[in-house]
Amino acid sequence: MDRELWTLILSAVKRAAREVGWNGGRRPPRYPNRLVVAMYLWAVWHDRTMSWACDRSHYTGLFRPRGGLPSVSRFTRRVKSDDCQRILQLVHDEFAQRGLVTAEGYVDGKALLVGPASKDRQATRGKIPGGFGKGYKLHAYVNEHRRIVVWSVTGLSEDEKTVASELLPHLPPMAPGAVVLKDSNYDSAPLHKAAAALLPDAALVGPLKGQGRVGPGGHHPVTLRQMGPERRELLAAWRHCPGLVELVLRARDTIERVFGVLCCTAGGLGTALPPWARTLDRVRRWVGAKVVLYNARLAAQDRLREAAAA
């Protein structure tokens, strides 16, 4: 499985590097972009620092770079370059099946915690199950094939509805009548209006928030008018056929399972950030590489199943 995984990753990195080319100057670099990106993914897969990747003794038969390796300072600079970040984005798009039209998607957030005594000024405090924590949050859109297609990392205190509205323009094409399943944290009239404008063929479906404060006569006519037709339709669905809506929402457990696999498998994200993943830029690169590895593992599993069935 590991050999199949790294064969796919190295092939995708080489294709992306050829597409990006070299835009950092007139001369090609001594250490090509594909080598820098592959070294970074190797270090992230092994949950090690970037300096660890610059030691040749840490490579095996699965991945053994030819020639010399860059110094730690040069490697860290190159990983942050626009070319290498563009390569990582193209590799993510390939494994995430970004161009695939789907009929169902799921959106949710997951806390990425740091220690309470951490000096990271960009890590913020926010609510987590059972209380409060400090760290960051992964916001993700997952398609029906369990691929993490679009994601963002923010401070833990960032509102999920605000981040979701920023993710909407980047969602992949959806089939007519598609649904995006969410939890009650995403229930807001502005988000429903934004989704209707950006995803005319899809609808947000999820639990309603604050219904316990609604009187026996229902919502005020002004409130109904201001919330927009999309949320009114969801409100009517909950009123007239709650069992059907609850049946549809059972599929939202898919994203919970995706987060479970992302965090619990070997080389996965884990339950907390490692000590060297601090500040927003580093955390985003670290999480992005973990997402690439997760999607690549699914692609490798699909390939092995196809080979076994052939």
Image (cartoon, rainbow, N blue to C red):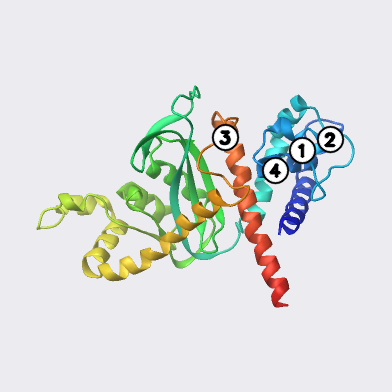
- Left or right, 216 with respect to 204, comes to left
Q: Are marks 3 and 2 in contact (CB under 8 Å)?
A: no
Q: Are marks 2 and 1 in contact (CB under 8 Å)?
A: yes
Give the quadrant of residue 11. bottom right
According to the picture, the residue beneath numbered tag 2 turns out to be 31
Real-space Cα separation, disc 4 to disc 1, in angstroms: 9 Å
- Left or right, 142 with respect to 94, comes to left
- Dot placed on the residue nearer the N-terminal end, 2 or 1: 2
According to the picture, the residue beneath numbered tag 1 turns out to be 36
Q: Residue furthest right?
A: 67
Mark 2 element type: loop
**As rendered, which of 98 and 199 lies closer to the eye?**
98
Query: Identity of the amino acid at label 2?
Result: Tyr
On residue 274, the disc is: 3
**As rendered, which of 95 and 116 lies closer to the eye?**
116
Real-space Cα separation, disc 3 to disc 1, in angstroms: 21 Å
Real-space Cα separation, disc 4 to disc 2, in angstroms: 16 Å
Q: Position of residue 48 (x, y in %)?
A: 67, 36
Real-space Cα separation, disc 3 to disc 4, in angstroms: 15 Å
